[in-house]
């Protein structure tokens, strides 16, 4: 049986064409591609690529200036943060959440928009594997090209499960029997009709948005749409730790904000879900509430009129 696409590039001794990530004594990273007969130059001397070709990962190379560098293959989280970008990428912490919470499985049929720089596409392709299907939609041709180059560089060529369409998702989406739809775009609420048509019953819509206003509009529009169950919304914060002797504490710096995530499941056609018993906070739908489409609020004095008691 042949190896899954890209797997041979993830293991074994270093080969020509592999990406190498060097770590210097200060922990700084440098990434390059191995080429026979070439040298890697640093401000503290150089070393020949040939020294690494055939060597195991985790090898240390010494430059002519006597500085040691640790050589490893970059992991996918390293790769997506260092690859050329068109648009802002989905960070590894959020990609991990999407894979887990949108329940991406080997062989899954997934639709994604937009492609941006191809960070999330690469995570999704690795998770669905060669037997899956990822159809990605991107409205900007230049971004689609950058993403295709990034994905091909990672897998060592085109991925057999990947198809890219240039255009707006809401105008072009015609896939059916889709298990998962992942939206990373400005206005996911504009895509709900075609997404509902594409998804199988029980399928998952997952949206990644940068601002609270996008989050609110997406959630409220999903609620009004009727083809989905009650959405779940969350964000993740990852704090790395400094661990040295008795100095064990959170690092001073962290990624403060990337985006918010939400998921909702596609209901079977014609199904009206049991009404969710929830009591909005006083004022949640009050006079100041403008609704997903900008209409003015209908709430009463405390905005909780019509709300069911918990
Ligand atoms: C933040 S970027 C996506 C980043 C990408 N997920 C990644 O990990 O590299 C958002 C992208 O969505 C595209 N976009 C916005 N609205 C779209 C739509 N309706 N259909 C298709 N692409 C859209 C934009 O052109 C942009 O490239």
Image: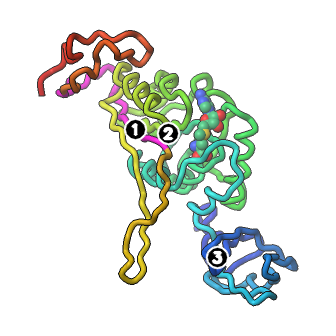
Q: Name the image colouring.
A: rainbow
**Image position of 164 (left or right of 295):** right
Q: In the picture, residue 273 is in which quadrant?
A: top left
Residue at 25 percent across and 20 percent down: it is 283
Circle 3 SS class: strand
Residue at 44 percent across and 65 percent down: it is 240
Q: Rounded to the nearest whole Å, what is the CA distance between mark 2 and mark 1?
A: 10 Å
In the picture of the structure, the residue carrying the numbered disc 1 is 262
Q: Rounded to the nearest whole Å, what is the CA distance between mark 1 and mark 3?
A: 36 Å
- Within-10-Å neighbours for mark 1: few <14, some 14–19, many 20+: many
Q: Which mark is on residue 23?
A: 3
Residue furthest to the left: 309
Closer to the camera: disc 3 or disc 2?
Answer: 3
Q: Rounded to the nearest whole Å, what is the CA distance between mark 3 and mark 2?
A: 34 Å
Q: Residue 15 at what x, y percent from top left? A: 73, 76
Q: Which segment is the magenta one?
A: 259-278
First reached walking from the N terminus: tag 1 or tag 3? 3
The reply to whether residue 102 is visible in this rendering is: yes
Q: Which mark is on residue 182?
A: 2
Residue at 69 percent across and 78 percent down: it is 14
Residue at 53 percent across and 49 percent down: it is 132
């Amino acid at each position: 049986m042949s190896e899954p696409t890209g797997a041979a590039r993830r293991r074994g001794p270093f080969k020509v064409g592999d990406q190498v990530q060097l770590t210097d004594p200060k922990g700084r990273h440098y990434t390059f591609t191995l080429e026979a007969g070439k040298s890697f130059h640093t401000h503290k001397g150089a070393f020949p690529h040939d020294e690494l070709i055939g060597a195991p990962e985790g090898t240390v190379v010494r430059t002519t200036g006597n500085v040691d560098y640790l050589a490893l293959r970059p992991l996918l989280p390293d790769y997506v943060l260092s690859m050329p970008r068109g648009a802002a990428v989905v960070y590894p912490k959020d990609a991990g959440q999407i894979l887990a919470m949108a329940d991406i499985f080997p062989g899954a049929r997934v639709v994604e928009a937009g492609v941006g720089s191809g960070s999330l596409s690469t995570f999704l392709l690795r998770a669905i594997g060669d037997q899956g299907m990822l159809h990605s939609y991107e409205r900007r041709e230049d971004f689609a090209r950058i993403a295709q180059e990034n994905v091909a560089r990672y897998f060592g060529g085109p991925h057999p499960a990947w198809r890219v369409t240039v255009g707006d998702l809401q105008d072009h989406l015609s896939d059916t029997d889709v298990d998962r739809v992942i939206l990373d775009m400005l206005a996911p609420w504009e895509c709900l009709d075609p997404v509902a048509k594409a998804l199988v019953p029980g399928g998952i819509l997952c949206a990644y948005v940068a601002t609270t206003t996008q989050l609110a509009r997406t959630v409220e529009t999903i609620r009004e749409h009727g083809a989905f169950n009650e959405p779940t919304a969350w964000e993740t914060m990852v704090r790395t730790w400094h661990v040295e002797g008795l100095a064990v504490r959170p690092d001073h710096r962290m990624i403060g904000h990337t985006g918010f995530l939400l998921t909702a499941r596609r209901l079977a056609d014609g199904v009206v879900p049991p009404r969710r018993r929830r009591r909005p906070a006083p004022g949640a739908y009050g006079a100041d509430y403008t609704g997903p489409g900008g209409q003015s609020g209908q709430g009463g004095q405390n905005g909780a009129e019509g709300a069911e008691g918990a």
